[in-house]
Image: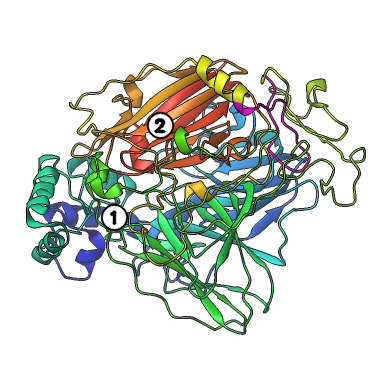
Amino acid sequence: MYKNDKTEDRGIFPVSRRRFVQGLATGGALAALEWGGLRAFGEAAPHTPPTLSGKHFELTIDTLPVNYTGKRSVATAVNGSVPGPILRWKEGDSITIAVTNRLKEPTSIHWHSIRLPSDMDGVPGLSFSGIAPGETFHYRFPVVQNGTAWYHSHSRFQEQLGLIGAIIIEPRHKDPIEFDREYVVFLSDWTDTNPEILFNNLKEQSNYYNYHRLTLPDFISEAKRNGLRRTISDRLMWAKMNMSPMDILDVTGSTYTYLLNGNNPTTNWTGLFKSGERIRLRFINGSSMTAFDVRIPGLSMTVVQADGNDTEPVKVDEFRIAVAETYDVIVQPRDDAAYTIFAQSQDRSGYARGTLASRMGMTAAVPAMDPVPMRTMMAMGMPMGNMKGMKMGGMEGMNMSGVDGMTKKDMSAPNGNSENKEQDMSGMDMGGQSMSGMNMGNQSMEEMDMGSHPAKHDMATKPPEMQGMAGMEMGNSTGTIPFPQPGPNTMPIMSMSMAEMKRAEAKLKPSNPVKLHTGPQIDNVPMEVTERLNDPGIGLENNGRRVLTYADLRARYRGVDGRPPTREIELHLTGNMERFIWGFNGEKFSSAEPIHMKLGERIRIVLVNDTMMEHPIHLHGLWSELENGHGAFNPYKHTINVKPAERVSYLVSADTPGHWAFHCHLLYHMEAGMFRTVVVS
């Protein structure tokens, strides 16, 4: 009989023999720590991770007694904090980070989304050997980008145990995003269960932590809505797939406590403001398995950055943040009040919560969680008659904004989020502005300092190929030197007309379609897949709030690599839910060959999700330019969330050599096989 620790502790269910033995083991381990009367981390007042600034950082990884649930446990902390300290860097600086391992096992830190040499990326067995117990490893690299980022361990399940933290990178020049104060809002999920045991539970029974079940009232309600015959047919299909439409997240609030800046909902982290201030909230989803739906009742949010890259402002009431994604938003409270930062898990099994207030001690009401969402036949890739009229992303309706000589228009999203207006594109567009009207602050074109940029492994050297117009940053025409992050001082190496774009697409060497069949590694192959970039995601459709979608994300600055792709790589996200096996193209990492890219290549990656779960896919070392219809202004991302039975494509410039990790950022999916090595050479 499988039950959850936290629920059992409340005395609702009997304790299984397995759980009893597990409890003895955990209790013995904790007793050995000799707690004494010391207060555990998480039992005191609301916690805000400390901020470290400068060019040299010293970080120590060690165990830390914590108590988030009323039960003492042990976390893996950085400098005695969970999350670890906020690291504040400056674009253009060269930094060193000395990481000392005080654990009894090897460890590592991966700098998520940071452009750097591959041997500094921090993936044991791939780019370096890891940090042995008692040793200190020195990370050294120049900072060639700006924005919100984060770091985490890439060693087994240490990320789940708390080895996570935020990074803020200040831009070299004046920040184009105006704000009066800022806060990091770091979301994570915590469990008192040993992650190894949690993983084994999922392998033995994939719905071990999912207590949501369909009931007779659910059946009656669905039959009234869709008809008895269709309802019975749907239920039989779910049964045949050994799946439930209530399978939203693999690990739920039955074992997870959701944290905001390392605080549980009761502790209630608070950030202060003065009326009328523009507050920048840097949201980071540093959880292991949980997507969150975020809103601040009573305040609209203006999204200004996604995954560390500036976007055109989009005003929303709510957004979904997948595991590993970051979103920066601006809010502007105009009264003497308190507002709840509310982040409910995608499956509505719990929430993280904080407060924005004009003075300490103030609180606001915590909203009720939304109804538990249910998957539809769309998750199986079944043709949906009721999808008529829904906008799908596809080339037919692709907005080619950003192509020279054309007018750029926003894609209108079904939630009505888009507020950008038509602008004239006369002249060369440099990040949404013509050269003649380009706002350079107080600097002339000649005065702008290009600064350093990576050149292969010597990333502090500025190659001549990058020196276009005075003060402007660009890549070289072969793409063998890393391209700079798009910004107000960058320019593309190539731009194409609509006709040229079509000719380039016609010459594109397509990937060989992947033919998959059900078997031990694959339990489902959808009948059809679609692009649904205007779809906010399950549980957010038509909820009466303005919800961000991927279609809303338009880069503030034109992409730097304007070359068309010359090759496509099609990858299917596959799995066997019952056996909890995950992979790409029906292969686990242990049996898969690396993905090879030639240095300088421009590639389109096509992801096809053949499973009934969302997968946030992260490519290390290179930017992923999501093809969402905005042409030269497609957003740069480091993590792309792919919905069930969805097809997504993005462009990659293979501009940095090395061995790079490519994986689903759901921690237990990655460990169960959804991981590949990308070799750029």
* Magenta stretch, residue numbers: 480-498
Disc 2 residue type (three-letter): Leu
Disc 1 residue type (three-letter): Thr
SS at mark 2 in the image: strand
Residue 189 at x, y percent in the picture: 40, 56
Residue 66 visible in the current orientation? no
Q: Say if mark 1 contacts mark 2, CB within 8 Å.
A: no
Q: Name the residue under label 1.
A: 26
C-alpha gap between disc 1 and disc 2: 41 Å
Against 406, residue 64 (above or below) is: below
Pick whichever of labels 1 and 2 is earlier in the sequence.
1
Q: In this view, does 376 lie to the left or right of 572?
A: left
Number of callouts in the render? 2
Q: How crowded is mark 2: few (under 14 residues within 10 Å), some or many (20 or more)?
A: many
Residue 320 at x, y percent in the picture: 44, 55
- Within the image, what quadrant is residue 299 found in? bottom right
Residue 320 visible in the current orientation? yes
**Of 648 and 363, which appears nearest the observer?**
648
Residue 138 at x, y percent in the picture: 65, 35
Q: In this view, does 229 lie to the left or right of 290?
A: left
Rendered residue at 36%/61% (across/down): 542
Q: How crowded is mark 1: few (under 14 residues within 10 Å), some or many (20 or more)?
A: some
SS at mark 1 in the image: helix
Front: mark 1 or 2: 2
Magenta part, dominant SS: loop
Q: Mark 2 points at which residue?
A: 607
**Of 75 and 91, which appears nearest the observer?**
91
Q: Residue 342 carries which label?
A: none
